[in-house]
Image (spheres, rainbow, N blue to C red):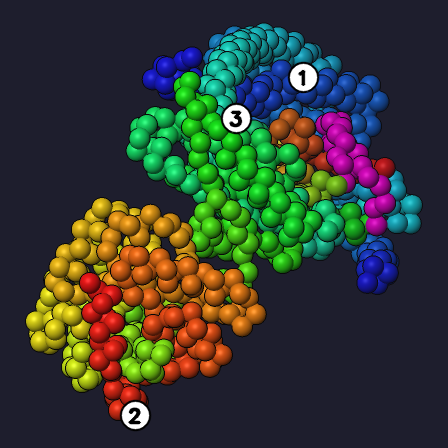
Amino acid sequence: MRISAILLSAAFTVATFMALPAYAQSEPVILTIDGAIEGGKPVDFTMSQLEALGTATIVTSTPWTEGTPTFDGVPMRVLLEHVGAKGETAEVLALNNYQTSVPVIDFTTYPVILATKMDGEYMTVRNKGPLFIMYPFDAVPELQAEIYLSRAAWQVRTITIK
Amino acid sequence: MLPRAWFRQLVLVVLVVLAIAAVVHARAVQDSAAAVQDSMRFDVSWIGAQGRIEAGQLEAKVALYAALRRPQDARAAEMFYQILLGRLDSWNVGGYRDFLQASPPSQQAYDELQALLTSVEAEFTDLTKVDDMPALLERLSPVSSIIDRIGAEASISAVAKAAAIRDTLTERQTIQDYLVTTLLIAAGVLLVLTALQNRNLRAAHKAVQQASERYAYSARHDPLTGLPNRTAFSHPDHSLFRDMANRRAAVVVIDLDGFKVVNDTWGHIFGDKLLTAAAHRLRDLVGVRPGNVVARLGGDEFVALLNVSDEAEAVAFANKIIEALKRPFEIDGSVTTIGATAGVALAVDDNWDTLSLMADADLAQSHTKSRNKGTVGLYDPGLRERVERRLTLENQLRTAIEKKEIFPHYQVQVDLQTGALVGVEALARWHHPQLGLISPAEFIPIAEASGQIFNIGKYMIDCACRDALRLPANVPVAVNISVIQIMQGEIMDTVAEALMMSGLAPQRLKLEVTESVMMMDRRRAIAVLSELRYLGVAIALDDFGTGFSSLSYLSTFRWDELKIDRSFLQNLDTDPLGLSIIQAVLVLARKLGAKVIVEGIETDNQLQLLKKTGCHVGQGYFFGRPAPIDTVCELISAMPPPTSAATRRKSDSTR
């Protein structure tokens, strides 16, 4: 089961690399995952490659947004499984150089997503895009603490697995 | 001791205090939690700091592009412009907006920054088209200082907020301190109250225990003598007997003799003192061996449980008890003597039961008391049978007369010289449907004890008078009467009525009484007998020579006849002494003017010996056994008729 999942994800990765030249010029890389992952080499993602992994939705208020927006994005658990992450911590670096460190266990404990859309729209850099780590703050009150708020990084660019 | 009402009120107060403390504590915790939440959510200075970094990045990228003119630096500067705009947007929501609205200098700075960034929007659409980069740098130069102004304000606000939160927390802390103190005091008060209450409870418990011990003691002890009572005695410690090899349990029931007389003569107080003294004597005597118990059954009855090796030891011990009780008691300066009768019952094995042993011993005691007062009687299974038979007879005696189960048999009395009939004696017979023929020796004492003797006596006299009419003229009929009948005095009416109803001449009726009649109330006995004799009825002294044999009563009453007891005839053949006594009685009787009848003649040899002594009249199996009147009538018809000599002798002797 586990072996077949790894093989499947490996096959996916190969397919992605093979397909890469065709999209390289039209779609920019928005996310790079490196560190302790399958194959040891950094993996780049475009928006469509990310969305191809499947998405989930979180509806929640945050201290930085008005009302209760709907966030769509790739579950972090799925994303890290996809790259075969082997570490316990995800070091997140944002475009604005904001750095935060998220324990990987957060992604299996809570349905955390790497949001690509807010209220159905892709997020611009000005609007905390293009990627925003989102916890279900409203659904899980224990998350409404500084430690989790600091992990909800926006304008995410690189994730390093350690 | 704390009064109950006070205790309740105190407990109530403590409960109310605790309830208030609980509510205050809950609110304090809630407030504290809210304050902590506050401190985490709206750390405005933190968001401000990020903005300061982003502004720095923007300036750095723009400067880098201005210096090197590399396109990637332009893209980076454009991105940081967007990031900074995004930062400004995020300052316009939630807690940061609240802060801005509350702080006019910050709001002014924010608006200024917004205006500044908006003014360079065109340049940042595509930075590569801007020629005068130094001018753009110059325009952007206030950004950082504006953000610093906001940051400073935010910092002051955050510090103030933190101080407020700290104050709240400190305040709550103080409240909680008070609460803890209150709780400790309440706990202390409760502890003290509990201790007091415990002391009360302990005292109450002790009182109850003492009372229950007192009740338990009085439930198991006789208040007068202090001995265990019947209840306590019924549950002895069996293990004391089981643990000792070859030991058996014996129960001795002791009844004081003559206590009632002492009680009636000297009064109850004296009687109670005597009982107590007797109890102490018993206790000292019986309590010498483990397992031995002495108890008071009630009245003047005591019971002892003894630990003995055999029957002989039990009886010896019982005798020791009797002897001890016979020793004089000195009470209030006067000396009193009483006796005691004991009954002993022994357990046959280890599975004995006190109550049944006690019942056996009691039976032995009452049996002994009725026969040999002042001695020790040992229970045997036959005793119970006898007593049960006695009970059965006593119960059925009443109806036995009605059912004609009791009726007279007659035995002839003959002239020893001529063999002629001189009289008959009526003897009561009870033919019991189940038990068969019952001897008068057995049922007459029962009838005397139960009072049935009057009915039986009257019936016997009635029958005898009626049946006598069927006998040859001048043949008298003798009927035995009981001492009790004489003492009650009803015998006069019974005899008079029987004679009148039957029409029998009084001279033909003879009443036989035993020596014991003179033992009771001699004066009264003589009065009644004299009255009967005045009627014309003859009075015979039965069983002469047995019992107490005081000769004095021979002189106080004019007996018509002396009946020599059959016991004198038993060894007549070999023992000349018996014959000598008979001869002496004959001499005595002649002086007194009384006739002599010898009872129990069974052999011809006896008859010949008696003939020689000059005895006149005899009766016994040799002449005929007691039989119903019809049979006797037939027997009589075969006998020589009464001679004139016999009649003459009779008239001589009665003179």
Q: Are marks 1 and 2 in contact (CB under 8 Å)?
A: no
Chain letter for the residue marked with disc 3 in the picture: B
Q: Residue B98 in the image: x percent, y percent?
A: 49, 19
Q: Secondary structure at mark 2?
A: loop
Say which amino acid is labelled 2: Ala
Q: Eyeballing the image, is B550 above or below A19?
A: above
Q: Which residues are magenta?
A: A84-104
Say which amino acid is labelled 1: Ala
* Marks 1/3: CA–CA distance: 17 Å
Q: Residue A80 in the image: x percent, y percent?
A: 78, 47
Q: Comparing marks 2 and 3, which lies closer to the viewer?
A: 2
Q: Nearer the viewer, residue B102 or B20?
A: B20
Q: Nearer the viewer, residue B487 or A69?
A: B487
Location of mark 1 (residue) = B49
Disc 2: CA contacts within 10 A as few (<14), some (14-19) or many (>=20): few
Q: Residue at (85%, 37%) from the top-left corner?
A: A162
Chain letter for the residue marked with disc 1 in the picture: B
Q: Secondary structure at mark 1?
A: helix
* Marks 2/3: CA–CA distance: 158 Å
Location of mark 2 (residue) = B638
Query: Which numbered disc flags the more N-terminal residue, 1 or 2?
Result: 1
Badge count: 3
Q: Eyeballing the image, is B135 above or below B303?
A: above
Location of the N terminus of chain B (image quadrant) = top left
Taking B578 as reference, is B489 left or right? left
Location of mark 3 (residue) = B93
Disc 3: CA contacts within 10 A as few (<14), some (14-19) or many (>=20): some
Q: Find out whether residue A93 is within the magenta segment.
A: yes
